[in-house]
Image (cartoon, rainbow, N blue to C red):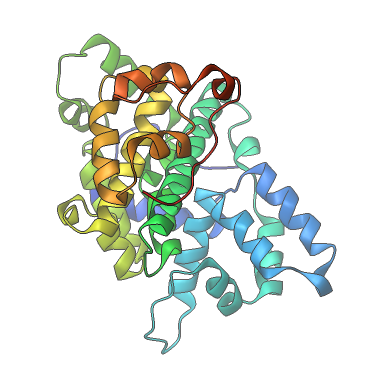
Amino acid sequence: MTPRIEEPLADAASWADWFRGQIPTLPLLRQSKRKIDEEATHATEINLHQLAEVVIGDPLLTLRTLVQLQQSKKGETRELTSITSALMMLGIQPFLHQIHALPTVESALADQPVALKWLLSRVARARKAAHYAHDWAVLRRDINAEEVTVAALLYEINEILLWLFAPKLMFLMLSLRKRFADHPIEVLQRKVFNTTDLELRDAAIARFNLPTILKELMNPQNAENPRTRTVLLATRLARHLSRKGWQHPKLEADIEAIEQLVHLNRELLLRRLDAPYEVWPRFGVPVPPTSESKDHPTKGNETQ
């Protein structure tokens, strides 16, 4: 049975320590486990890259894999951020054996269907952020697009962990945000968790002993670095779209910042983001002719 936290822990470090202790039995998504079990039935013909794609589609499994890798390194000073390389280092068979014994998120929250819904929505948001980050990293010809992708996928991992292990406190947080919408969110977070989201993320990243480059890419203080800015903007856009869709009032600022980051003209950017035609004028882009607008926008070419 998955343990639960009913009362707030003392501080960010205590939360991070507790989360770190759950890594060996951290649940994964049911979809991930099913796909991995299918791969395991063909153990002699496992496609390593397909297996890595399954892992990187699951924030919890990605976190577990990287933490386990950091733990298993014996005398190895080189830091690995590639999921494919991590699987090779851990060993395919040991990895498959461990995964088979793990519970699923869906079973862990079987008695908390609303919390499960919230958690899955955050997983979807993390995947969307990772998708954006990877796309923009490729456009920018980033030296290692996978690092940026993983950083975006894990940027809000603490919220996923809180929905998994402390749903009672997360519901309390939701209630307080509705009642005290004018209060700074950090004040409410400290009241519920004895820490803030930023403090908890920093403490958890340090306690998980993630590769240094991921720590740097997930640090808002490094926002001047284009790679870090890619992670931050991808997370921000995914968050805004998940809340109010293309009607979110801060999207103009998001689009302008992304445009400057990837150096793509605005029409092509909106196409890559699958923005519906009806919102294009809001961003200063005319709607295409009727013949073209019958079709849903598709991703444009990677040229200006």
In x, y percent, where is residue 137?
39, 57
In x, y percent, where is residue 218?
29, 54
Horizontal side of 54 relative to 247 (left or right) equals right
Horizontal side of 286 relative to 191 (left or right) equals right
Instruction: Identify the residue at horizontal 77%, vertical 56% (top origin).
Output: 37
The foreground one among 172 and 54 is 54
Instruction: Tell me if residue 181 can be seen.
Output: yes
Instruction: Identify the residue at horizontal 37%, vertical 70% (top origin).
Output: 143
Q: Reply above or below: 250 against 82.
A: above
The foreground one among 116 and 83 is 83
**What count of labels does the image hold?**
0
The foreground one among 143 and 19 is 143
In x, y percent, where is residue 241?
40, 27
Q: Reply above or below: 170 against 211.
A: above
Instruction: Identify the residue at horizontal 63%, vertical 30% (top origin).
Output: 110
Question: Toward which corner of the image does residue 109 lie, by quadrant?
Answer: top right
Residue found at the far top of this picture: 179
Instruction: Identify the residue at horizontal 29%, vertical 42% (top origin).
Output: 258
In x, y percent, where is residue 297?
53, 30
Instruction: Tell me if residue 244 can be seen.
Output: no
**Which quadrant, please, contains the N terminus?**
top right
Question: Toward which corner of the image does residue 98 lie, by quadrant?
Answer: bottom right
Horizontal side of 140 relative to 125 (left or right) equals left
Q: Reply above or below: 185 against 33.
A: above
Residue found at the far bottom of this picture: 75
The foreground one among 55 and 273 is 273
Horizontal side of 171 relative to 221 (left or right) equals right
